[in-house]
Image (cartoon, grey):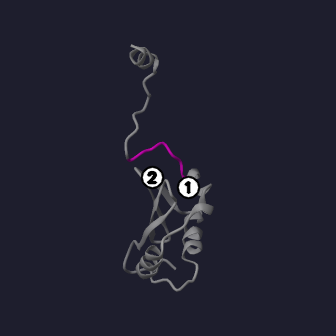
Amino acid sequence: MLITEALSKLKPSPEPQTLSDDGCSSELLLSNLDKLHTTDLGTERILKNLHLDTADVVGWCRGKIKAPKASITRKGKNWYITSDNCEFTINAHSYTIITAHRRTKKHDCQ
């Protein structure tokens, strides 16, 4: 009975949320870039996929994500960022860079 009463007092949300829109703005990711990290295998995967030659993969990715023209969206548990012909996938809870790819085969992300 208490549950029914509590539920009856809830106001319906004007816009339903879906898995593709968690109501999170890109500012959440940008304000937590200091938490960005990856695993050893993630580092290898990113270096290979983007043809990078850098010792600081996370720092390089952080720079691309902070770029003024970067496009940041969140779908479900991941952030998806497109910047300079690169696409990054980042776990929204742990801020782990899962992978990164080039958008086209004609251009490197560098």
Q: Position of residue 95 (x, y in %)?
A: 52, 60
Image quadrant holding the N terminus, namely: top left
Q: Position of residue 94 (x, y in %)?
A: 50, 57
Q: Which mark is residue 83?
A: none
Magenta-span inclusion, residue 25: yes
Of the residues shown, which amino acid type is indicated by label 1?
Answer: Leu
Examine the residues drawn in magenta and state their main secondary structure. Answer: loop
Q: Residue at x 55, y 65 (%)?
A: 65
Q: Is residue 91 above or below residue 23?
A: below
Q: Nearer the viewer, residue 81 or 4?
A: 4
Q: For mark 2, does the 10 Å Cα neighbourhood hold few (<14), some (14 to 19), or many (20 or more) residues?
A: many
**Magenta-colored span:** 20-26
For residue 18, side relative to residue 28 (left or right): left
Give the mark nearer the N terminus: 1 vs 2.
1
The residue tagged 2 is 74
Q: Kindly give the residue lying farthest to the bottom in the view shown.
A: 53
Magenta-span inclusion, residue 33: no
Q: Which mark is residue 29?
A: 1
